[in-house]
Amino acid sequence: MNNLNSGEVVQIHSYKHDGNIHRAWQQTVVIENSNDLIIGANNKTKVTESDGRNWYTREPAVCYFYKNHWFNVIGMLRKDGVHYYCNLSSPYLFEEGTIKYIDYDLDVKVFPDFNFKILDRDEYDKHRKRMQYPPKIQAVIDQELQFLLNMINNREGPFRPGITEHWYRVYINNIIGGI
């Protein structure tokens, strides 16, 4: 386990397999840190793209970063319910005040009714060839995608009904309210 405490503000950096920065979130607030999982939350945080463009997230989000799984999950709280965006990625690494991971292109968008879409297969295929993803990584991505889809279908982890709303309340009541 790392030395992160609830309430600490950290950045999030997403890289590509070739080591280049892909995207950076200016801040997220740690609300839970365990041996396998960091949960953070943010609202209207600044995001910087690799080309220098900036934008701000539109809604509150709870982010789940795994130490032993090749994906992360962002639960976005919207008026019609929680929407999830799942990135197939390396397990996180925490260093220099930043949660870091490698984005492996494939994404899963999950709607409030738990229907989902797998996105960016073309981007995955293009980068897999161009950056020469090793066969072991390709196999892990395939395996972890199936694990993630099972979590979604079984409403486990971040997909358990009410859990993202719970963590957002912890963020608002205990973290933001305590600052």
Image (cartoon, rainbow, N blue to C red):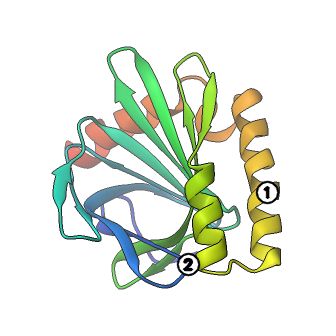
Q: Is residue 21 left or right of residue 149?
A: left
The residue positioned 43% from the left and 19% from the top of the image is 81
Q: In x, y percent, where is residue 91?
A: 62, 69
Q: In x, y percent, where is residue 26?
A: 23, 64
Q: Hey, what amino acid is under mark 1?
A: Asp
> Of 9 and 55, which appears nearest the observer?
55
Could you give the CA–CA distance between mark 2 and mark 1, rounded to whole angstroms?
A: 16 Å
Q: Which residue is mark 2?
A: 17
Q: Which mark is residue 142?
A: 1
Q: Is residue 127 visible?
A: yes
SS at badge 1? helix
Q: Is residue 141 left or right of residue 77?
A: right
Q: Hey, what amino acid is under mark 2?
A: His
> Of 5 and 129, which appears nearest the observer?
129
Q: In x, y percent, where is residue 36?
A: 65, 63
Q: Are marks 2 and 1 in contact (CB under 8 Å)?
A: no
Q: Is residue 90 visible?
A: no
The N terminus lies in which quarter of the figure? bottom right
Bin the neighbour count of mark 2 within 10 Å (Cα to Cα): few under 14, some 14-19, many 20 and up.
many
Where on the picture, by quarter, is residue 142?
bottom right
